[in-house]
Amino acid sequence: MHYHKEKNHLVIEIDERIQGMTLLEFFHYLHLSKKTIHLLRQNKDYTLNNTYVDYQTILKDKDILSIKAYEQGRDFIEEESSLDIIYEDDLLCVVNKPSNLIIHPDDKSKMNTLCNYVSYYYQQTHQDLPIRYLHRLDRDTTGLVMFCKCALLQPYFDYMIASKKIKKTYLAIIQGHLPKREITIDLPIGQDRHSKNKMCISKTGKDALTHFKEIKTKGNYTLVKCQIETGRKHQIRVHLNHLHHPIIGDTLYGKTSSMIKRMALHAYCLEFIHPLTYQTIKIECLLPFDMEKIIR
C-alpha cells in the first residue's frame, strides 16, 4: 500500500491485499487496542474517502484511508550529537548506537543517552514527535536501534518484536575458534543465583536459541555472526561463554582485552516485513572501527 504522513494523520491507499477487509479488521491487523479503536471512533479521528464511516465498512481497492496517527511533543531533553541515521521513513528511524551509551535515562530530566541524541535530531529536522525506542542494547554494544515515529503503528512493531518477526543479527569477536563453522545452541537461560548481574545456562530458565556462524578468523580471534531466535537477557554472551569462547572485552562473562576497550558485540542487521508496503526491509550497519581493526 502507498502511504504518506499528512500533518498528524497517516494517509493510506488501500490495495488488493487489504480490500475486502472491514475497517475494524484492518485496525486489528495493525494490532490496535480496543481502547485505541474506541477513541478513534468516538473522536471521529479517521475518514474513508474524506468521509467518516462506520468501522464495519468494507475497504475497497484505491480507497483513501486517513487516520490520526501521530502524537506531538519531544519528551526527552535535546542533546547535540553527530547521530548516525541508518534508515528513516514516516514510521521508523533506525540509529547506529555508539559504544558506552545507554538507550534512555532513568529520569527524563537527565541527559547523555541515545534518546537525548534522537530528540536533538528530531528538533533539527523539524519533527515534533515523542521519542519511542522499540528495543534496547547494552551500554557497550554498538549497532542498530529502532525508534517508532508513528504512535498508531507502535503496537504493530511491539508485536513484531515480541513474536520475533523482526530478525536480529549480531556480529561478535570471540576468543579462539568455534568447534564447527556453524553451530546452534539451544539451551535455556536463567538468573545466576550467585550474581544478580549475570545470567547462566539453567534447566529452570527460559528457552534460548542462538545460531552462530564463523565469518573470519585472525590469529586466535574469530568474527562470528550471531542470530537470535529468542530474546533472553545476555543470550549471545551466555551461549558463547558456554562454548568457552567468550566475547573479547566482555568483563562480566570473560575478561578485559588489550585489543578493545569494550565488549566486541555489534547489532549488525535488522530484517522485517514493512506493515504497509509488505516489502522486506533489510537494514545493515557496518562493523565499527574498534572491532574492524582487530580482524582486518
Image: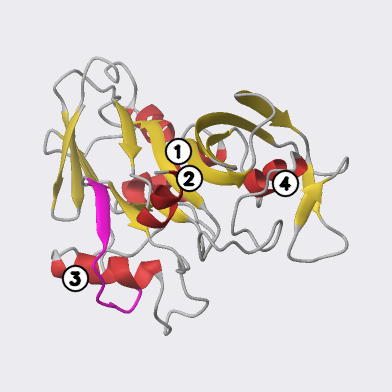
For disc 4, the marked residue is: 241
For the N terminus, the quadrant is top left
Which residue is pictured at 26% across the width and 48% down the height?
A: 86
Residue type, label 1:
His
- Label 2 to label 1: alpha-carbon separation: 9 Å
Task: Of the two numbered discs 4 and 1 on the same chain, state the one appearing first in sequence.
Answer: 1
Q: Which amino acid type is shown beneath numbered disc 3?
A: Gln
SS of the residue at dot 2? helix
In the picture of the structure, the residue carrying the numbered disc 3 is: 123
Q: Secondary structure at mark 1?
A: loop
Distance from Cα at disc 1 to Cα at disc 3: 29 Å
Look at the numbered discs 4 and 1 and tell me whether their residues touch, using CB distance below 8 Å: no
> Residue 61, image x and y in percent?
18, 18
Residue 31: which disc? Answer: 1
**How far is mark 3 from mark 4, CA to CA?**
42 Å
Q: Secondary structure at mark 3?
A: helix
Between disc 2 and disc 1, the foreground one is 2
* Marks 4 and 1, how far apart at CA: 38 Å
Identify the magenta region: 74-88
